[in-house]
Amino acid sequence: MDGGFFSFIDENMVLGVTLLPVALSVFFLHEFGHYFVARLCNVHVENVTVWIGRQVWSRTASRGTIWSVRIFPVCRFVHVSE
């Protein structure tokens, strides 16, 4: 028997497909930690952006923080006012 329909899948492919969502989740939680600590310290957060590039979606929260998603899944940042 040749292994069936999913015989083309090996452990390296499973690792690669699993690693991307895990890494994105860790980055998201890390940046949310910055936001959470800034809020605990009464620092106004102006902008929370996920990814880089052209803006795809944004929303202004009730406290004035702009939450936005950009086009390229590379990084995130939290911008606070001074």
Image: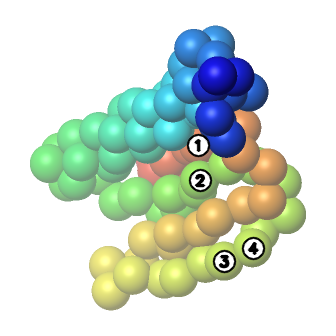
Kind of residue at disc 2: Val
Q: Mark 1 points at which residue?
A: 76
Residue 44: image quadrant is: bottom left
Which residue is the site of mark 2? 50
Dot 2 falls on a residue whose secondary structure is: strand
Colouring rule applied to residues: rainbow
Q: Looking at the image, is 36 positioned above or below residue 10?
A: below
Identify residue for label 3.
57
- Residue that appears at 52% across and 72% down: 66
Q: For the residue marked with disc 4, what is the amino acid?
A: Val
Cα distance between the residues tagged 3 and 4: 4 Å
Residue, far front? 1
Identify which residue is drawn at 57% across, 14% down. 11
Of 1 and 47, the residue lying toward us: 1
* Element carrying mark 3: strand
Q: Earlier in the sequence, mark 1 or mark 2?
A: 2
Q: Name the residue under label 4.
A: 56
Q: Tell me what residue is drawn at x 40 percent, y 58 percent.
A: 45
Within 10 angstroms of label 4, few (less than 14), some, or many (20 or more) residues?
few
Disc 2 to disc 4, how far (Cα)?
10 Å
Q: In this view, does 42 lie to the left or right of 26?
A: left
Most foreground residue, 4 or 65:
4
